[in-house]
Amino acid sequence: MRLTYPACLYPCEEKEGAFTVEVPDLPGCVSQGDDLANALLMATDAASGWVLDELESGNPIPKSTKPELVKPDKGGFVSILVLDMDSYAEKYGSKSVRKNLTIPAWLNTFAEINHINFSQVLQDALTSMYQQGA
């Protein structure tokens, strides 16, 4: 799942070339970088962590505001962060939930013969449904 969020970037007064980044749709999500590229990278990481925490806690994630509606404070500008939540969760996600399931015996036999990972199939199907808004 890929998400986009507008971010407000502000030049740092303390260090030339550095930027502070705020993500208005994610309360308290603020980051900083030594230059523009690093600031965007750090903000993407912070926003991804913020969203992953909400997902793992079972909370809905905030909808993204249209970038043209975001008005930064004086001296700031808006950029878009792109979050690849699948990659981020694979690398940093830590919470798993065990689920039992019931399937017909013939389907179980088929899956075992073909070395099908039940957990992966269920995760793939649920992720696809989630992305489609089902």
Image (spheres, grey):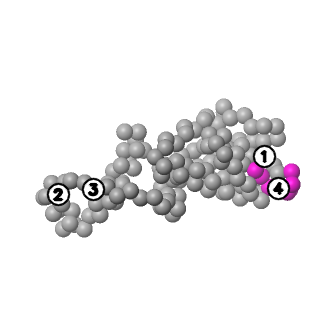
| Upstream in sequence: badge 2 or badge 1 | 1
CA gap, disc 4 to disc 2? 60 Å
CA gap, disc 3 to disc 2? 15 Å
Examine the rendered structure and indicate whether residue 110 appears above or below residue 73.
below
| Upstream in sequence: badge 4 or badge 3 | 4
Residue 15 drawn in magenta: yes
Residue 107 marker? 2
| Upstream in sequence: badge 4 or badge 2 | 4
Classify mark 1: helix, strand or loop: strand
Classify mark 4: helix, strand or loop: loop
Viewer-nearest of discs 3 and 2: 3
Residue at image point 25% right, 54% down: 101
Mark 3 burial class by Cα count in 10 Å: few <14, some 14-19, many 20+: few
Classify mark 2: helix, strand or loop: helix
Q: Bounds of the magenta span?
A: 13-20
Residue 74 drawn in magenta: no
Q: Is residue 114 left or right of residue 95?
A: left
Residue 95 found in image quarter: bottom left
Residue type of the residue flagged with mark 1: Tyr
Q: Is residue 47 visible?
A: yes
Residue at image point 55% right, 49% down: 51
Viewer-nearest of discs 4 and 2: 2
Viewer-nearest of discs 1 and 4: 1
Mark 2 burial class by Cα count in 10 Å: few <14, some 14-19, many 20+: few
Q: What x and y, as percent, mark residue 32? A: 73, 54
Residue highlighted by disc 3: 100
CA gap, disc 2 to disc 1? 57 Å
Classify mark 3: helix, strand or loop: loop
**Viewport quadrant of the C terminus:** top left
Residue highlighted by disc 1: 10
